[in-house]
Image (spheres, helix red, strand yellow):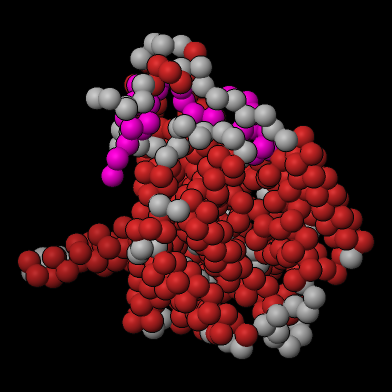
């Protein structure tokens, strides 16, 4: 048909020249802010706990955008989507930023920085409970072993007595015989169990430690298979390998496709994405369990992973819209990305505004209806004092109703600058959402740990929040700009390029 674009005309791709000044500004802001943040951390050790929450918030915000980029890349290939081919490279560039974010998150998990134990209270509580349990077990070990010997001797005596009584009977009735046989069988079973019991010092110490650990911290005891230091670090390594491995593998195959016409790359991307999706979903879900839900180890929600994922997908699409608009303003992708692509991206952003609200309300409704103390405490804390108005203003109205109504209009989705403005609004609301998830835990946790009156807010801590956000944002921006220039801005040899160039919806 006349007027259709031919992918062969774009086979050489389009390469981005990173603005040196902008990169230097991002690098200076990022590195300078990072140095200042950690200088303040070590010069003000009493503020370590408050600063840990600030750094966690900043890292998780930008990590969520990168995770969203990975999701859109995986979805694009797994669903064999054609429309998004021209913006897929931007998704891939955003996805590989997961490595930068997880590396920036290392201070959170290295105890020497002083953040870990302040953020995740189960670490020091578990350690303290185990110390008490081991001490009590050491003291009670000899008495326990002596008691076990007495029980063993008593059981043996009872068994011998029962056998002797049975043997002394001349002609017992069938009922009498059955009675003694049952009694002797029960005593033999009990004796066998006692004989098989490991009464060594190590086994007794372990048993008593568990007993006293249960008395000291019952919740941490029943969760000990998951909430223990070794498992926590092993899981982080698995998250890192899974997420970074998926992101870089997909990008490597995609870039190879630009220069190698072999269709195997297309097949690998499709099959690989279908196989990677379960690992991606599992890694992200358990990462937010470990980093965010475990800020209060007594609280739990089965919808937590989906709730955080919904925010990632929504706001990474918003960032993609902003990136596309900025690149077009700079003279790139002008003949590649059309208003039809904006319309589709706007519809996806609208869909995830609704999906986020649905999951957020469902989580709240189920917890409210069940009315279980361990669950409702999450919302009670966030409906107290300042946080009550914050929730209604930024999450209920700002995160859902306003973008929902605006994005209902088709014209908005066909106007790049207006749609980019809505994307910026959604990113601000995402900022508020993650702030609402993380920061309300700070005041009560730190004041309780210090043994003072419970405070909902830590005075002046917002300065650390802002400094951490700017620092991580500067480093994230520098590496993203650098990444944009390493390959063509769109996959120029993808077999679906024609479909994407001429998409109509």
Q: Where is residue 295 in the image (x, y as percent from the top left)?
A: 60, 66
Q: Report the quarter where the C terminus lies.
A: top left
Residue 122 visible in this rendered orientation of the protein: no
- Residue nearest the viewer, comparing 419 with 468: 419
Q: In this view, does 59 lie above or below 242?
A: below
Number of on-image labels: 0
Task: State the residue at coordinates (37%, 15%).
Answer: 264
Report if residue 93 lies within the magenta region: no
- Residue nearest the viewer, comparing 283 with 485: 485
Residue extending farthest right: 43
> In this image, 115 relative to 145: left or right?
right
Task: State the residue at coordinates (46%, 21%).
Answer: 10
Quarter-wise, where is residue 478 in the image? top right
Residue extending farthest left: 174
Q: Report the quarter where the N terminus lies.
A: top left
Quarter-wise, where is residue 123 in the image? bottom right
Residue 180 visible in this rendered orientation of the protein: yes
Task: State the residue at coordinates (41%, 67%).
Answer: 406
Highlighted range, magenta: 479-505
Quarter-wise, where is residue 163 in the image? bottom left
> In this image, 179 relative to 65: left or right?
left
Report if residue 480 lies within the magenta region: yes
Q: Position of residue 256 (x, y in %)?
A: 50, 17
Q: Position of residue 433 (x, y in %)?
A: 54, 67
> In this image, 160 relative to 481: left or right?
left
> In this image, 233 relative to 495: left or right?
right
Q: Where is residue 355 in the image (x, y as percent from the top left)?
A: 36, 62
Task: State the residue at coordinates (78%, 60%).
Answer: 467
- Residue nearest the viewer, comparing 202 with 432: 432
Q: In this view, does 143 lie above or below 458?
A: above
């Amino acid at each position: 048909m006349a007027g259709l674009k031919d992918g062969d005309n774009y086979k050489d791709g389009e390469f981005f020249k990173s603005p040196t000044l902008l990169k230097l500004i991002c690098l200076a802001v990022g590195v300078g802010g990072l140095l200042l943040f950690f200088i303040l951390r070590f010069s003000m050790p009493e503020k370590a706990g408050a600063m840990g929450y600030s750094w966690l918030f900043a890292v998780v915000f930008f990590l969520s955008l990168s995770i969203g980029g990975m999701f859109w890349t995986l979805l694009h290939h797994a669903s064999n989507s054609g429309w998004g081919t021209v913006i897929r490279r931007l998704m891939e560039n955003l996805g590989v930023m997961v490595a930068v974010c997880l590396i920036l998150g290392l201070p959170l998990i290295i105890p020497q920085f002083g953040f870990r134990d302040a953020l995740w209270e189960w670490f020091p509580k578990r350690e303290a409970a185990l110390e008490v349990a081991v001490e009590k077990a050491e003291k009670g070990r000899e008495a326990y072993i002596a008691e076990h010997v007495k029980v063993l001797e008593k059981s043996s005596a009872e068994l011998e007595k029962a056998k002797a009584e049975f043997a002394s009977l001349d002609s017992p009735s069938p009922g009498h015989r059955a009675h003694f046989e049952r009694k002797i069988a029960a005593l033999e079973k009990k004796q066998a169990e006692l004989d098989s019991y490991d009464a060594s010092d190590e086994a007794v110490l372990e048993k008593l430690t568990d007993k006293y650990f249960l008395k000291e911290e019952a919740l941490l005891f029943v969760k000990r298979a998951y909430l223990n230091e070794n498992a926590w670090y092993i899981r982080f390594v698995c998250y890192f390998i899974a997420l970074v491995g998926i992101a870089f593998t997909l990008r490597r195959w995609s870039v190879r496709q630009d220069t190698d016409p072999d269709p195997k790359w297309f097949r690998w991307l499709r099959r690989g994405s279908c196989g990677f999706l379960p690992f991606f979903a599992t890694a992200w879900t358990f990462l937010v369990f470990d980093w965010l839900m475990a800020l209060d180890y007594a609280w739990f929600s089965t919808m937590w992973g989906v709730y955080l994922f919904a925010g990632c997908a929504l706001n990474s699409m918003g960032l993609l819209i902003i990136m596309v608009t900025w690149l077009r303003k700079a003279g790139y992708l002008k003949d590649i990305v059309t208003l039809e692509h904006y319309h589709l991206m706007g519809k996806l952003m609208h869909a995830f505004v609704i999906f986020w609200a649905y999951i957020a309300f469902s989580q709240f409704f189920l917890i409210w209806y069940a009315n279980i103390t361990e669950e409702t405490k999450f919302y009670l804390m966030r409906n107290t004092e300042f946080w009550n108005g914050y929730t209604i203003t930024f999450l209920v109205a700002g995160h859902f109703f306003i973008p929902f109504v605006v994005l209902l209009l088709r014209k908005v989705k066909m106007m790049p600058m207006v749609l980019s403005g809505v994307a910026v609004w959604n990113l601000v609301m995402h900022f508020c959402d993650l702030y609402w998830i993380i920061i309300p835990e700070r005041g009560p946790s730190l004041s309780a740990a210090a043994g003072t009156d419970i405070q909902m807010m830590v005075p002046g801590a917002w300065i650390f929040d802002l400094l951490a956000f700017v620092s991580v944002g500067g480093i994230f921006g520098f590496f993203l700009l650098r990444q944009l220039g390493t390959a063509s801005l769109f996959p120029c040899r993808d077999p679906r390029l024609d479909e994407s160039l001429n998409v109509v919806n």
